[in-house]
Image (cartoon, grey):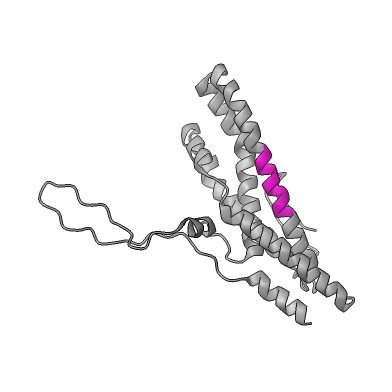
Amino acid sequence: MAFALLFALALSGAEPARSSTTDQPIAASAPHEPAAAPVDPHPMTEVQMEDALPDGAPKDDYGLVAWCHGALSGQIELDPIVEKDMDSIEGKAKAAQRKASDAAIAKEHKRYLALYEKALLSAEKASPVAIHQKGVDAELQGYKIWGPTRNKAPIWRMVDWGNWEVPPACEKAAKRLYDQASLFGEALKSEGPAPAPEAAPHADQPAVTPAADGLRGPQ
């Protein structure tokens, strides 16, 4: 089926930019003078930085969105732990001032999760083959980035948690994925009933996922 093939190709997608730093040789300096910092002759543009993939994240839109869902779910799972640590350090007055900001961020994170879930579900429904398990695996991969952080001392756990931001590439990929799935879904409907999706290997076995409310499980 032509549209099925096109959708499969769309899911694999072109490779977005991946963030990287080009190592440059350090210029020779006079004795007792600090070495000059290396200069990147090809600095990334703002658009390239927004499109840069997180280290270790899948390159295709479907896998990336699933990874982002898992990574953000892992951070949200740490919210109450880190906030409790911050409360004990800041004191009641500063903690109370921070609550409004925390609530706004939590609301935004829920919006991101809803966007990812809508895009992933749409892609899975429109795909001519079973891809849900691929999404579960990518999601677990994203969730696991918080493993080392959970075992750190509170102060360093707060640093990891506070420095991590949702990569802009996640939202872009989710919107692309949803638009592509909607387009191919409508096209497939116009062609008539599609054959039943190919069963994923061991589909009768539940996928192993962390005990996190935000993570999607087997369907």
Query: Which range is magenta?
Result: 107-117
The foreground one among 205 and 30 is: 30
* Main secondary structure of the magenta stretch: helix
Q: Quadrant of the C terminus?
A: bottom right
Q: Is residue 144 above or below residue 181?
A: above
The foreground one among 168 and 60 is: 168
User: How many marks are shown on the rendered structure?
Assistant: 0
Q: Is residue 193 in view from this perspective? A: yes
Q: Quadrant of residue 22?
A: bottom left
Q: Quadrant of the N terminus?
A: bottom right
Residue shown at 51% from the left, 45% from the top? 148
Q: Quadrant of residue 212?
A: top right
Q: Is residue 131 left or right of residue 20?
A: right
Residue shown at 56% from the left, 60% from the top? 57
Residue shown at 48% from the left, 37% from the top? 159
Q: Is residue 73 above or below residue 118?
A: above
The foreground one among 1 and 71 is: 1
Q: Is residue 61 above or below residue 196?
A: above
99 part of magenta stretch: no
x and y percentages locating residue 75 in the rendered image: 60, 43
In this view, the residue farthest toward the bottom is 1
x and y percentages locating residue 119 in the rendered image: 73, 58
In this view, the residue farthest toward the right is 193
